[in-house]
Image (spheres, rainbow, N blue to C red):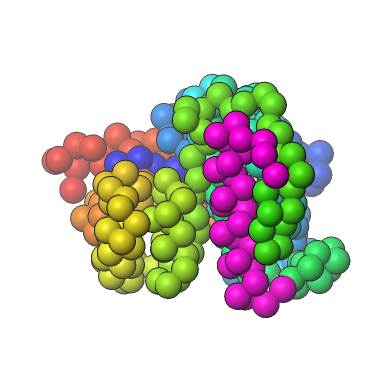
Amino acid sequence: MRVGLQVPSFTSFGGPDRIGPEFARTARDADQGGLDSLWVMDHFFQISMIGPPEEPMLEGYTALAYAAAVTERITLGTLVTGVTYRNPALLVKTVTTLDVLSGGRAWLGIGAAWNEEESRGYGIPFPPVAERFERLEETLRIARQMWAGDDKPFEGGHYALERPLNVPAPVSRPRPRILIGGAGEKKTLRFVAKYADACNLTNPDEIPHKLAVLREHCANEGRDYADIEKTALARTDGSLGQTVDTIGRLGELGVDHVIFSQGTGQDLTEVLAAARGGATDPGAR
């Protein structure tokens, strides 16, 4: 079982002058503690489930590049990038840059976008949901093409790229891993089976059914279901026992990689490092 940490809030780190040092400490502790992944949200305003929009929020890829410089082995990604936020070729170039500078540790975490408030706040187009999914599929196709080293023109319904050149190539082989966030059964999980290396689910009660749907999409796409990493976003009260129990319970549901979201005021790196070791010990539960 792999264990990761998501940092969705920077409020408890202190004022702007303290956010950098405290985020660096968190990243180093997670890396040195043996955690498998470090994630930030790709939002520009704080989201309502965590706090008011005025809370501090860092741009995701700049934050990950900073984390890459102070870590050595932990993988790095956004959970997840809204497809409408960036030109797709620029997004692929950004993730490639992160992958090169981190020595092959970048994820492309992506989804169809949902936060209309911040999109309108920043003047980012926020098309209807059907179009957002169309853009998501085109972006996934562009990513796969660019990471294959193919710079021939791309013509889609929403994006036209004359020459999607991507040099240098990523360090990851065969390319950075793609994680798609969301649990939609008709499109999201089908896109996972067709284009991605990992899914991300959030509701434990739905996980068995959603994974069954994913398995069916894999069969239809001729994809080995076992090749897809099943990740889940989880919360913990910070106690070792509850954290290990959550890891075990999600593992029994078919999850390969549990990503714990760090609540405001929490410091989960030490307990997650201990839980990761305990969860691999059959006598720990």
Q: Name the side, left or right, on which 185 lies relative to 82.
A: left
Membership of 138 in magenta stretch: yes
Image quarter of residue 53:
bottom right
Relative image position of residue 222 (x, y in whole percent):
30, 53
Membership of 197 in magenta stretch: no
Looking at this view, is 149 or 7 the one in front?
Answer: 149
Judge whether residue 191 can be spotted in this image.
yes
Relative image position of residue 228 (x, y in whole percent):
35, 48
Question: Would you place residue 73 above or below residue 277 in this image?
Answer: above
Q: How many numbered badges does the structure rendering display? A: 0
Judge whether residue 255 can be spotted in this image.
no
Image quarter of residue 185:
bottom left
Q: Main secondary structure of the magenta part?
A: helix
Q: Residue at x 27, y 58 (%)?
A: 219
Task: Name the image quarter holding the N terminus.
Answer: top left
Q: Name the side, left or right, on which 59 lies relative to 104.
A: right
Q: Residue at x 57, y 50 (%)?
A: 141
Q: Name the side, left or right, on which 151 lies relative to 119.
A: left
Question: Would you place residue 90 above or below residue 47 in this image?
Answer: above
Which segment is the magenta one?
A: 127-153
Q: Name the side, left or right, on which 164 lies relative to 129.
A: right
Q: Residue at x 67, y 39 (%)?
A: 152
Relative image position of residue 160 (x, y in whole percent):
74, 53
Q: Residue at x 72, y 73 (%)?
A: 127
Question: Would you place residue 195 above or below residue 120 in this image?
Answer: above
